[in-house]
Image: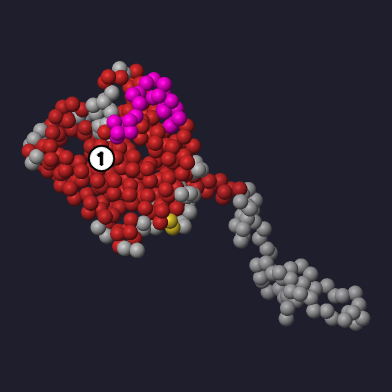
Amino acid sequence: MSGASRWLTEPVPRGRVAAFRTLVYLFVAADLVVFTPWVRTHGSVPGELYQPLLIGRLLPLPTPTPLLVNGIFWALLVLSLAAVTGRAPRALGWAVFLLYFEWMIIAMSYGKVDHDRFGFLVALAVLPTAGRARHGDRTLTEAGGWALRVTQIAVVCTYFLAAWAKLRFGGPGWMVGSVLARAIIRRGTELADLIAQVPHLLIAAQFGIIAFELLSPLVFVVPARWRLAVVGFFYSFHVVTIATITISFAPHLVAMTSFLPLERVRPVEWCRRPLRQHATPAVDGEPVAGREPAVPQAPAAGAGPVAAPPAADSAATPAVEAAPAPVVGDVPPAGAAAVP
C-alpha cells in the first residue's frame, strides 16, 4: 500500500465514526426546522423562477412543487432521525444523502449558492461506506478512517477554493477593497461597528482571511500534537465571523468535527455513570448504595488465638485434614481451628 493510500485510510476508532454520524444526522434534522425552513416556500414559487444548478440540469430533476418539497421535508426528517440510531447505516445513510442533496438543489436553484454545504454534503456521501459503528468502541477501522479523511479534505477545500475564487473574480483588489465594510453595513453587529472604527483594521483582516484560507491545507502536515490547536483556530475564525457579521457556517462547522477525537465525548455514558454507582451491588469491598459494608471484627489486642471447640470424642475420631476456609480481612472464621 502506498503512502497516500495509508494516509487516506488511516484507521480511527469506531466510536469516533459513531459519534460523528450521530452529530451529522442530528444536524440534518435541525437544518430542516431551524436553519433552512425557508426552503419549503420554494414549492409555492412559480416554476419559471427555478434555475437548477448544473447537476439539476444533467439528471434532470423535477421542478419543485408543494407536493415534492413537503414530501422530501417529511421523509428526510423521519429518515435522518432514524439514522441517528446507527441502525441500517448503509440503507438509511444513502437515503438521507440523496434526499438532502435534492433538498440543497431546491434551496440553491433560485439565485443563491452557499459554499458552506460542501464539506457537509461530502460527509453525508461517505458515511454510508463506513459500516457499523458503536459509541465508545475503540476498535480501529480503515473504512471509517477513509470516510473521515475525505470529509476533512472537503473541509479544507472549502477554505482553499474560497480564497481561489476571491482572487480569481476579485483579483488582488479584493484584499484592499471594502468587502468587509459592506458586510458590516448589511448585517454587522455592535461589535463589528466598534471594529470598523479602527483605521485600516478591516483591510488587515481581509489580508488575513486570504492568508488563512490559502494556508489551511497545512493542517494535514503540522505535527499531530498541534493539529487540534490548528482546528481550534479554524473554529475561532468562525466565532469571530458570527460575532461580527452573523454568518454561522453551521454545516461546515459540523463537518469540521471530523478532525476531533469525538470518541471521548460520551454524554449518555456520563449521565449513566452516577446512576450505575447507586444501583450496582458492592464489589471488592465497595459499599452498596444505602447500606454500610460489613466490617469484620478483629480480635482484641493481646488476646491469644481463638481455639476451636473440642470435639466430642477426639480419641475415637481420627484426625481429618479439612480444607482451609476462606479468610476475610485476615481474621479466622468462626469455628476454624487455631493456627499455631
Q: Can residue 265 be seen in this snapshot?
A: no
Residue at point 43%, 49% (across, down)? 130
Note whether 96 is above or below 280 in the view shown: above
- Main secondary structure of the magenta stretch: helix
Residue at point 65%, 67% (across, down)? 329
The image position of residue 176, as x and y in percent, is: 7, 38
> In the picture, which quadrant includes the N terminus?
bottom left
Magenta span of residues: 55-77
- Between 145 and 189, which is closer to the camera in this rendering? 145
Color encoding of the figure: secondary structure
Could you tell me the amino acid type at mark 1?
His
How crowded pointer 1 is (Cα within 10 Å; few <14, some 14-19, many 20+) is rated as some
Q: Which residue is mark 1?
A: 238
Q: Quadrant of residue 56?
A: top left
Residue at point 17%, 30% (across, down)? 183
The image position of residue 98, as x and y in percent, is: 39, 36
Q: Secondary structure at mark 1?
A: helix
Q: Can residue 29 be seen in this snapshot?
A: yes
Does 16 lie within the magenta span? no
In the shown orientation, is residue 74 left or right of residue 281?
Answer: left
- Between 54 and 119, which is closer to the camera in this rendering? 54
The image position of residue 208, as x and y in percent, is: 15, 44
- Between 328 and 5, which is closer to the camera in this rendering? 5
> In the picture, which quadrant includes the C terminus?
bottom right
Q: Quadrant of residue 194?
A: top left
